[in-house]
Image: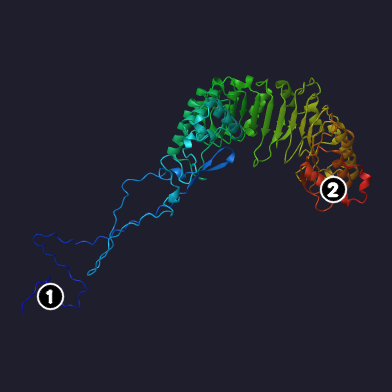
Amino acid sequence: MEEEEPGSSGLLPPEVPQASSSRRPRAPQKRKRGGKARPTGPLPKRQKRKARNPPRKAAPHYFVHETDNDMLLIISNVGEADDRRPARKGLKRKRKEPPRRQGRLTKQWAPAAKQPGKPLRGGAPSSAQPGPSGVLEGGCQPFPLNTASLPGGSWGEDLPVEILVQIFQFVVGSEGAVPFLCRVACVCRRWYGAASNPVLWQKVSVSCCWVTPGKELALAVEKKVLGTMEWLATSRFSLLRDFALCHWKSQVPFVLQALAESCSLLASLKLSHCSGVTTESLRALAESCPRLQSLNLQNSQMDSSAVLSFLETAGSRIRHLWLTYSSRMRAIMAKLASGCCPGLQLLEVNTEIKQSIQLFRLSVEQLQAACPQLQVLRLLNVACYVKPTPRSAPPSPGFPQLEELCLATTALSLVDDHMLERLLHTSNRLRVLDLRGCSCVTPKGLELLPCPDLERLYLGLYTGLSPLRLPINGSPLITCKWSHSLRELDLAGHNFGEKDLHQAMAAFTRHEGAGGEPVLRSLNLTGTKVTLRTVSTLIASCPSLDYLNLSSCRQLPRGTKKAYRGSHEIRQCLHQFLTSLEEPSGLGEVK
């Protein structure tokens, strides 16, 4: 037997057993003359056919045009059905003939002739096609389709820039300049020109970019943010008056330096929950902005030396100051008491919510002598006490211009009648007195205050104190003194008796305002011992009452112990009370 070549058949060579090998090496194929070499690699995959686009839907014979006041106009476009959609180039396909079978003859495919009356591709019957004069064959005149000729079609481009600026001012006043002006500037060139008017950028509030908690802002994003702030300061903030920076943990000195270089008209600055404020940045801002009068540094972390340096430079023109009290702020309060801000009108000192209670010693007489024009004093959630005065000390000038005093707290309170007398012994213009949480203040001490026209008095207790420590008499002393001017009263949580509260509420039925109506509009009696008859008499005598809180009042029937807002709900409450009483005619005529 003759030997065959290894690649000529599917058998193995005689010296290698066939069962001992599952694969054998493939011999290289010989290249044929005049032909191409056969590829040895894997065969290429078949390419998927591209899905055909779905057939174009028939266009409607109308379109909807939106106008002002959310009105929609349905306008016919029968006359321009052919001109509305231009033909696209390169999409014309060749007609394919049907396949022919062997041995048979087939007819050529031909398009069907148009029949009169059948709808065309545009959805309109052939008999309704317009003629050369633009009039339909049926005698109907088509509606105009050119949107440029319609009134109000391009109102945004034709509107004068001055009117656009006035419209933007309303939105900026309610929503702020950022990001509204940044968004409308992307609409068109006219809106961009209107949004770039410096008049719209007089009050700006900027917050930090949101990042995942626990992660820092990317370096590229931070660089872009700083570039945007620098561009805004140089291009938009030439008339800036009020600026607020919130939740910035870094790069605060860069922003303050940009404001100092470009915003000479700045009058108010707010840094809320910011950190990293340096002494140089605040001092540069105080030197470059001669009109700066308001500074808000609440909940911001900074060294007290930065604030002291700012007060030394610009303290003579500061009118409003907001601070968050801590151990580092004691030097600042001592600086204020030394007379660095003689024209200060508003001073607010608060503490953080999670901060522990810290005792704050208030130098009343020194502060009164250093800030004689103070109008608003707020010590929120601060356990303050006054330093005892020696007998040989001269009488203090007090706060003759004071209109609001707030000593509210949710924790320990050391405010008593003696402290109130030292603070308000010359405050004849006081209108607002907030003593929420001050359980040591008595009705007798309030009666002795020289404040004849108090309008808002808040005495609510929300700290869960024992009722044994609270007075049970004396509420008529409060209402009889200010019933002619009191508009809002809060007695929540007090332990006054039923008869005592009845006499106190009866004072509002005897005193009326200048217009013939009682001036009381808001009353909070949460957790008190007020009775059904007392509340009914009060509602019937005070038609201006707009808010009434009767939550947790045990003397009232079920279903009525809640807060009532609005005159309609309060009148429904009165009707419910009258039906619960045995003798409703004894209450008198209900207005």
- Relative image position of residue 240 (x, y in whole percent): 56, 25
Can residue 243 be seen in the rendering of this structure? Answer: no
Camera-nearest residue between 510 and 330: 510
Camera-nearest residue between 491 and 539: 539
| Residue 304 picture quarter | top right
| Residue 348 picture quarter | top right
Q: Is residue 198 above or below residue 128?
A: above
- Relative image position of residue 90 (x, y in whole percent): 31, 47
Q: Quadrant of the N terminus?
A: bottom left
Secondary structure beneath dot 2 equals helix
> Rounded to the nearest whole Å, what is the CA distance between mark 1 and mark 2?
114 Å
Q: Residues within 10 Å of mark 2 (few under 14, many from 20)?
A: few
Camera-nearest residue between 285 and 5: 5
Instruction: Name the disc covering residue 575, or none.
Output: 2
Secondary structure beneath dot 1 equals loop
- Identity of the amino acid at label 2? His
| Residue 451 picture quarter | top right
Residue furthest to the bottom in view is 1
Identify the residue under disc 1.
Answer: 13
